[in-house]
Image: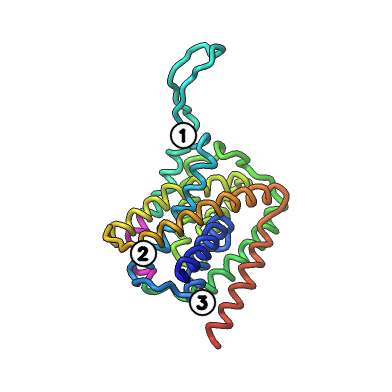
Amino acid sequence: MIEILKVIIIGIVEGITEWLPISSTGHLLLLDAIMPLKMTPEFKEMFFVVIQFGAILAVVVMYWGRMWPFGIKTKESVPKKGAYIKIDIIMMWLKILVALIPSVVFGLWLDDWLEQNFYNPVVISIMLIFYGVLFIVIESWNKRRTPKYNELGDLSWKIAFFIGMFQVLAMIPGTSRSGATIIGGLLLGASRTAAAEFTFFLAVPTMLGASILKIAKFGLAFTSMEAVTLLVGMVISFFVSIIAIKFLMGYIKKHDFTVFGWYRIVLGAFVLAISFM
């Protein structure tokens, strides 16, 4: 029962931190240091990735109408009834595939090496602080400029690819996948809304691919407790993510990301101090 309670807490933390630019992986690793789960290292490595896909499914549910490119016209008022394809959504997915290329290349090459060398509290703390400062600096600069790309459809192929390059930075724990891509989008001229939405959509194939790789590496021989652990974590992170996404999209309409920068700095400094005590 205690282990399931830990999983519920982890699911809540994942659902919140996956979308706020404060590093879900960093928070999960720090949480595991405080209240470690009783599971094998191999399962834990897979669990901390696949649980994130539960959060990603929240995006699919919430944005399904803007993600699914196929439909059927049934109203009598429509001149030509029948199946149709939304070309703008097809183009969006093609741009997302372009943005995915850097993560695929660098992920297959560096994933294991990064896990062995960078998954520790000191690295997480440094990344939390560094990107916290970056958020504050960029938002200060961002107030003095007008975005070039206000809508998701405004982003060019080139911009999509370079946002994908920023996502590679999130392979280092403590960076934040959403934080890295949002920072990239802002630096490249996107509005906060366009940068956040592109981040949400890019997360779907990114985390689907990462989850498949981790499950393939671990295998499908789950114990009953492991299966329950994974299912509970994903379900909790799914429902909490819906709340977190709605909060973030409402928040950025009136505020910038500076508060998240300060949060990262304070948390990073605290963890760094604890690490050297």
Question: Which residue is at 26% across, 60% downward?
Answer: 221
Callout 3: SS: helix
Is 210 within the magenta?
no
Looking at this view, is 262 or 105 the one in front?
262
Callout 3 crowding tier (Cα within 10 Å): few <14, some 14–19, many ≥20:
few
The answer to whether marks 1 and 3 mark residues whose Cβ atoms lie closer than 8 Å is no
Q: Position of residue 107 (x, y in %)?
A: 37, 59
The disc placed on residue 53 is: none
Callout 1: SS: loop
Looking at this view, is 220 or 56 the one in front?
220
**What kind of residue is marked 3?**
Ile
For mark 3, what is the residue? 34
Q: Judge whether 33 appears above or below 104 on screen.
A: below
For mark 2, what is the residue? 225
For mark 1, what is the residue? 68
Q: CA–CA distance between discs 3 and 2?
A: 21 Å
